[in-house]
Amino acid sequence: MYVNRIYKICFSPTGTTDQVVTVLAGAMSKILSAPLFSFDFTLPGARRLAETSGSPAAWLAAAEDLPEPGAGDLVVFGCPTYAGRLPNLLLNYLNTVEGNGALAIPVVTFGNRNFDSALIELRDILENHGFHTIAAAACSCEHSFSYILGEGRPDGRDKAEIQDFAEKAAEKVRKLRHTSWESSFSPDPVSVPGLPAEKNYGGYFQPQDRHGISIDIRKVKPKSNPQKCLHSADCHLCADVCPMGAIDPSDITRIPGICIKCGACTKKCPAQAMYFDDPGYLYHKSELEDLYRRRADNAFFL
């Protein structure tokens, strides 16, 4: 079949998910000779209108001159895994997306541990909102908490695997047979692992200490080291890159909003002034680094 347009759409606080979907969507665009459009909904402004308007057509309204995807288009849709699921604070936004019959490749990234049920959750959201999922991927990337877990990933080896997957996915797209883009066109959803919606996708991964006692880091927030912070009137980068808009740009020591522990402020600060010192957070980080310091495999599904 002929594809009109390729879309690269993602949420990527530290940039690793964006790297993965950029390679995949770029390869699909080249292979299928279709123009590529990009939309990043990481920052609050890109999501605000869709979340407040209640209009399904508004989900791309923040992207200037970006045509809405529909039948004949292919969307590569990327999101990171947090605690084995999609980020729960994104769910309201994700439930405003509308595919209008577009094909889709759901992609999740994970921090070298496991993607658990994040991929099946993203697939279901896309299927429930008018997309036809024809392939899927879960790619290991550097963990948002750590510089050790998945260090430097996606790397050259990962990108070569993604390129190979793109060629196979493009071949599957070419083989889809239909006479026209009608509402009745509905290929079977791509099969992916994970617990289904009926089982609440298995819930969220709950960190524990060595005695099996749960560690709750949901309310933990980063701090700013005053000896490292540039304190420049022109630098409130940590506030600018926060996907939740949680940091007060006029006083970055204040974080009145919700922190999702995405790593954007800690990893993008040029002075490395942002840090976490909560004992539970640091214990969980140490446990992950001890248990999962290996090269986790990427997973691809057709």
Image: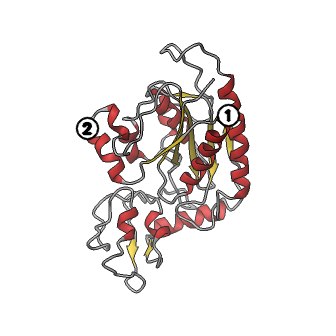
Q: Which structural element holds mark 2?
A: helix
Q: Amino acid at mark 1?
A: Ala
Dot 1 crowding, Cα within 10 Å, few <14, some 14–19, many 20+: many
| Residue 169 - label | 1
State the quadrant of the N terminus.
top right
Position of 298 with respect to 21 (left or right) is right
Q: Amino acid at mark 2?
A: Ser
Tell me what residue is drawn at x 49 percent, y 53 percent.
12
Tell me what residue is drawn at x 53 percent, y 61 percent.
144
The percent position of residue 281, horizontal first and vertical second, equals 48, 65
First of labels 1, 2 by sequence position: 2
| Residue 53 - label | 2
Q: Which structural element holds mark 1?
A: helix
Dot 2 crowding, Cα within 10 Å, few <14, some 14–19, many 20+: few
Q: Residue furthest bottom?
A: 227
Residue 117 visible in the shown view:
no
The percent position of residue 152, horizontal first and vertical second, equals 64, 64
State the quadrant of the C terminus.
top right
Q: In front: 220, or 245?
A: 245
Residue 33 visible in the shown view:
yes
The percent position of residue 101, horizontal first and vertical second, equals 48, 24
Is the residue 186 above or below the residue 76 in the image? Answer: above
